[in-house]
Image: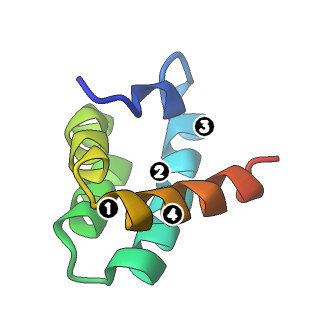
Amino acid sequence: MSHLDFIVAGLDESEQRARLRELRALAVVYLGVNSPVTRRLGEAIADPSAAESALALLDGVPALRRRRLLSGYGALTR
């Protein structure tokens, strides 16, 4: 379980996929296209059961990069 599970908890599948797409776009910018987090978020878009592991990987990103990515996500979802 990740500290970031709240991002997709309790959402229908289409909204969960939309949020994962947003996170993936930001992961490309902040972590790169070949980052394991970026790849796993892409997998989670296709298979929602992979969302938990994708968010756990994101939770393991160094703090400054993670904060920047999540603050960008927060700005998108306002």
Which type of secondary structure does the marked residue at label 1 adopt?
helix
Q: How many marks?
A: 4
- Of the numbered discs 2 and 3, the one sitting upstream in the chain is 3
Q: Which mark is on residue 69?
A: 4
Q: Camera-side residue: 28 or 14? A: 28
Percent position (x, y) of residue 14?
A: 56, 38
Q: Which mark is on residue 15?
A: 3
Left or right of 56, for residue 71: right
Mark 3 nearby-residue class (10 Å; few <14, some 14–19, many ≥20): few
Mark 4 nearby-residue class (10 Å; few <14, some 14–19, many ≥20): many
- Of the numbered discs 1 and 4, the one sitting upstream in the chain is 1
Q: Residue at x 64, y 63 (%)?
A: 72
Mark 2 nearby-residue class (10 Å; few <14, some 14–19, many ≥20): many
Dot in front, 2 or 3: 2
Which type of secondary structure does the marked residue at label 2 adopt?
helix
In this figure, which residue is indicated by the disc labeled 2?
20
Type of amino acid at the residue the image marks with label 1: Gly
- Of the numbered discs 2 and 4, the one sitting upstream in the chain is 2
Type of amino acid at the residue the image marks with label 4: Leu
